[in-house]
Amino acid sequence: MMLKGKIAIVTGASSGMGNEIAFKYAMEGAKVIAVARRLEKLEHLAEKAKKHGGEITPLVADISKQKEAESLVIEAIKRFDKLDILVNNAGIMDDFSPVGDVSDEMWTKVMNVNINGPFYTTRSAVKYFLTREEGGIIINVASIGGLFGARAGAAYTASKHALVGLTKNTGFMYSKHNIRCNAICPGGIVTDIGSGEFMKSVNQQGLAMASAGIGANPRMGLGSEIASVAVMLATEASSYINGQCIAVDGGFTAY
Ligand SMILES: NC(=O)c1ccc[n+]([C@@H]2O[C@H](COP(=O)([O-])OP(=O)(O)OC[C@H]3O[C@@H](n4cnc5c(N)ncnc54)[C@H](O)[C@@H]3O)[C@@H](O)[C@H]2O)c1
């Protein structure tokens, strides 16, 4: 029970890594507010947690919408009187387009979900964390695409590099206020991300270029292997880790 008594928000909890993180947090004793747009999926997750003795509260919100993203911290405090952990996990892929082929629509959507959403939630959380001695924990799910130039298209790569920058800046700026902000940068993880809107018709040239190093990936990872790192980053086990963006990729980027 490493997170007993903690209140956590996990965005993008209806599938993939967010689902695993929310469940693992609940199994470690946290009360989790699971955020996504699909209520049924969140309710299913809450049921599963309940069966195993955990507590998950579904909350429908679109984090790309400023008001909805900013309401999350307010909701947590309204329902549980506090917030300890914010996990910015929700994210979407682009279609592997290099910049010359990126549409305005895709650029805006990817940026709204992958960086503007985490900016809105992080700003709200930091303002709250500054009001209390205990501070708080922020964990961003970025990507190895936020560390290297061509693991996806231009929009996704730019959005995840921005999230890495936000992580480092936030971690350092509030380092004297008991607020820690770190990012997990997953490699290839088995989730639903490939069924996203822009992955239905991918840019073949961009995909071919982005796939150049794929043979170096030792294997695909599991959401549970990301969730265990998210637990570690939310506990005192990581008390001296701050402003870091940690690749969790089975060794892919060590190549
Ligand atoms: N799967 C991978 O290989 C991989 C690798 C590196 C990074 N990532 C990142 O991991 C994170 C989780 O992705 P995943 O692979 O689990 O994918 P996924 O598609 O299974 O899950 C993404 C979740 O985010 C939610 N979401 C999307 N847009 C949203 C919005 N506007 N508001 C609220 N929720 C929204 C989805 O509904 C879903 O619950 C993302 O940030 C993604 O970029 C994934």
Image: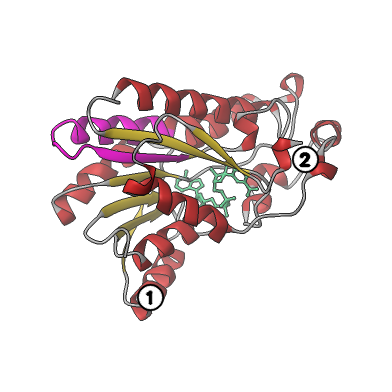
The answer to which of marks 1 and 2 sits earlier in the sequence is 1
User: In the image, is the residue at mark 1 within 8 Å of ligand 1 by its beta carbon?
Assistant: no
Q: Residue at x 21, y 37 (%)?
A: 135
Q: Residue at x 49, y 29 (%)?
A: 163
Left or right of 181? Residue 221 is: right
User: Which amino acid, mark 1?
Assistant: Glu
In this rendered view, identify the residue nearer to me: 148 or 119.
Answer: 148
Q: Residue at x 74, y 34 (%)?
A: 96
Residue reaching furthest to the bottom: 51
Total numbered labels placed on residues in the image: 2
For marks 1 and 2, give the one nearer the viewer. 1
In this rendered view, identify the residue nearer to me: 101 or 27.
Answer: 27
In this rendered view, identify the residue nearer to me: 72 or 140.
Answer: 140
Tell whether position 230 is magenta.
no
In this rendered view, identify the residue nearer to me: 37 or 33.
Answer: 33
Q: Residue under circle 1? A: 47
Do the residues bearing badges 1 and 2 touch, measured as CB atoms within 8 Å? no
Residue 60 is drawn in which quadrant? bottom left
Secondary element at tag 2: loop
Left or right of 82? Residue 92 is: right
Tell whether position 120 is magenta.
yes
Q: Residues within 10 Å of mark 1 (few under 14, many from 20)?
A: some
Q: Residue under circle 2? A: 202
> How far across and down, in percent of the image, does residue 57 sit?
30, 63
Secondary element at tag 1: helix
Q: Residue at x 28, y 33 (%)?
A: 179
Question: In the picture shown, does residue 234 fall above or below 103?
Answer: below
User: Which amino acid, mark 2?
Assistant: Val
> How far across and down, in percent of the image, does residue 159 sit?
56, 28
Range covered by the magenta-colored residues: 117-140
Q: Is residue 106 visible?
A: no
